[in-house]
Amino acid sequence: MVDDREFAGLRCSEVLALLSDYLDGDLDRATGDRIDAHVLVCDQCARFGGAFSTMVKQLRDRLGGAMAPRETRLRILTGVRDRR
Amino acid sequence: MDAAKLTRARAGDREAGNQFVAAHLDRVWRYSRALTHDPVAADDLVQETFLAALSSAEELRADDATAWLLHIARNLWHRQHRRRVGEPAVFESLEQLGDRAGWGANPERAAAAIQDRDRLDAALRRLDPDDREVIWLRDVEGLDGPAVATLLGQPLATVKSRLHRARLRLMATLHEEEKPHGR
């Protein structure tokens, strides 16, 4: 279980709730700064935030950008051309 | 560029049509595979999507060809596979989701799985389709929040909330897979 502590005016549960908005750059500067200050002293939020951020980044890096195999591309292009 | 190509393609310019399809095929293919989980169904969906786009009279704004095509693919798929979309049977608070995801415990336990493409993909496939879709659009394809909201037909705030919960559920799936047996 999490020890829901308060640092820099934010509780750990609040940091958890704001984590995606923080990663996506959707927070106002003041709130972002408070999260930075909280994470600086709160080890459990720093570790969880780091793992969460890595997962989000890996989704793009590992799964994004895959290209359709050559045969699939040809089949689709031919199919669209023939049916028009 | 896309809008001009599309106009020429609709007027019968086959080369323009081929270029338009080739330029967007990979993204539509990836999304179709994420939606269908079936390579044959995905290929069919991709073809139907481009056929619909090339024959539609809908004007394309210059900057949104990808989102527009994904929107067509989504509509085609859901029209063929109508399903009830609703809240999960059991509501979990963010703290409960966080606990399952390793918050306050050992979040690094899922590190190996996160770095492994196949395991990450497998965990994503185990999610509820709505969770998987919002993560795919936002995190894998990199569409911004407003574009995802438009594509899903939902308010931005709803999409953001769904995305955060979906990410936590994915992290929980990865974390729970790494749990030592018997604990």
Image (spheres, coloured by chain):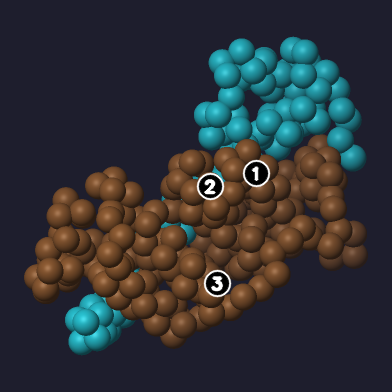
Mark 2 or mark 3: which comes first in sequence? 3
Residue B158 shows which numbered tag?
1
In-image side of A26 versus B88 (left or right) = left
The span from disc 2 to disc 3 (Cα, nearest Å) is 17 Å
Q: Nearer the viewer, residue B164 or A11?
A: B164
Q: Are marks 1 and 2 in contact (CB under 8 Å)?
A: yes
Furthest residue in direction front, as rendered: B57
The span from disc 3 to disc 1 (Cα, nearest Å) is 20 Å
Tell me residue B79's x, y (percent). 53, 75
Tell me residue A49's x, y (percent). 66, 34
Tell me residue B7's x, y (percent). 16, 61
- At a point 33% along the width and 78% down the height, the residue shown is B47
The span from disc 1 to disc 2 (Cα, nearest Å) is 8 Å
Residue B78 shows which numbered tag?
3
Q: Amino acid at mark 2?
A: Ala
Chain letter matching colour cyan = A
Which residue in the structure is indicated by mark 2?
B149
Q: Nearer the viewer, residue A30 or A59?
A: A30
Q: Is residue B37 above or below residue A44?
A: below
Q: Are marks 2 and 3 in contact (CB under 8 Å)?
A: no
Q: Are marks 2 and 3 on the same chain?
A: yes
Chain letter of the residue carrying label 3: B
Q: Residues within 10 Å of mark 2 (few under 14, many from 20)?
A: some
Chain letter of the residue carrying label 2: B
Q: Image quarter for residue A65?
A: bottom left
